[in-house]
Amino acid sequence: MVHTPLESNGFVDRIAAGRALAVAVEKLRLRRPIIVLALPRGGVPVAYEVALALGAPLDVLVVRKIGMPGQPELAIGAIASGGIIVREPGTVGHLPALDTRFEQLARRELAELGRRERAYRRGLPPLDLRGQSVVLVDDGLATGATMLAAVRAARAAGAAFVVVAAPVASDEAAATVGAEADQIAILQVPPLLFAIGAWYRDFDQLDDADVCRLLALAREKGSEPVAATQDTA
C-alpha cells in the first residue's frame, strides 16, 4: 500500500518526514507487538518518530551497500545483518570481472557492518524479532537493494509480518520491496528520483554518535516488546 501525502514538495528534514510517515504507518493498524527497525544512519531519525508514535521499541538493522569498484556510490548489491546478501540483477553476468570480485567486496562490507553493530548497540543484544510485526524504516529508497536485504534479514530472524516504510522511493524500489514485504508505506513515489537528498530541505549527514544518541533516547521513552499473541478464533 502506497500512501500519498498532502504536499508534494518534499520534507523539511528527517524528523518532519518521520512524523508524516508515522501517520501512514498508524493507518495500517498493524498487529502488536511491533518493533521498529531503522536502517542507519539516515533512517534512524525517521524511524525514531515512527517508533515514538507507535509506542514501539526501536532498534537498528544494519545494511551495507556494496559499491561498484571505482564508483562506490553506484550500488551493485547490499549485505545485511546475518550475512544476507542481495545482488543487483542488472549486474549479474553482464560484468564478468565484477562477478569474480563480488564476494570479496561483500566480505569487506560485512566487516564494516559488524563494527557498526557493535558501535550502535554498545553491548546490548538485538531485539528478538520472532513473532513480531516489524517496521523497517529508511529515509528513502533509490534502488531498493539495501531495503530488500533488510526485509530478508528480518524474515530470517523470525519476523511474523514485515512492513517497509520510507518517505520517498523510486518506482523501481517500491516495486522491488513491495514484492517481498507484507505491506509498504511510502509517502512519495516520484516519476524520476535522482537523489534522496533532493527531497529534503535539510539533509545533513549523520554520524555514529547521532545514531547512538537517538537509540538511547528511544530506550528511555519506548516500550519493551512483548511475546506475540495468538488468535484463538
Image (cartoon, rainbow, N blue to C red):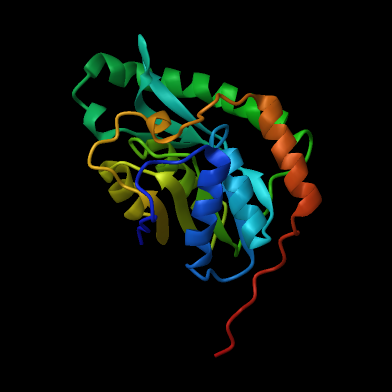
In which quadrant of the rendered view does residue 114 lie?
top right
Q: Quadrant of the N terminus?
A: bottom left
Residue 94 seen from this side: yes
Q: Position of residue 37 (x, y in %)?
A: 59, 48
Count how many numbered circles sit on residues in the image: 0
Q: Is residue 134 left or right of residue 184?
A: right
For the C terminus, give its image quadrant: bottom right
Q: Is residue 181 above or below residue 89?
A: below
Name of the residue lying farthest toward the top: 70
In this picture, is 111 found above or below 163? above
Which quarter of the figure has residue 134? bottom right
The percent coordinates of residue 229 (x first, y second) are: 64, 75
Residue 36 in picture, x, y percent from top left: 60, 52
Residue 32 % position (x, y): 61, 69
Dividing the picture into quadrants, the one containing residue 15 is top right
Residue 61 visible somewhere in the drawing: no
Looking at the picture, does residue 115 appear above or below residue 14? above
Answer with left or right where residue 204 lies relative to residue 216.
Answer: left
Q: Is residue 106 above or below residue 223?
A: above
**Residue farthest to the bottom, as pictured:** 233
Q: Nearer the viewer, residue 10 or 158?
A: 10
Q: Nearer the viewer, residue 46 or 75?
A: 46
Q: Which residue is outermost to the left?
A: 94
The structure residue drawn at horizontal position 66% and vertical position 26%, both measured from the top left corner, is: 208
Residue at (42% x, 24% y) in the render: 66
Name which residue lies at 29% across and 17% down: 98
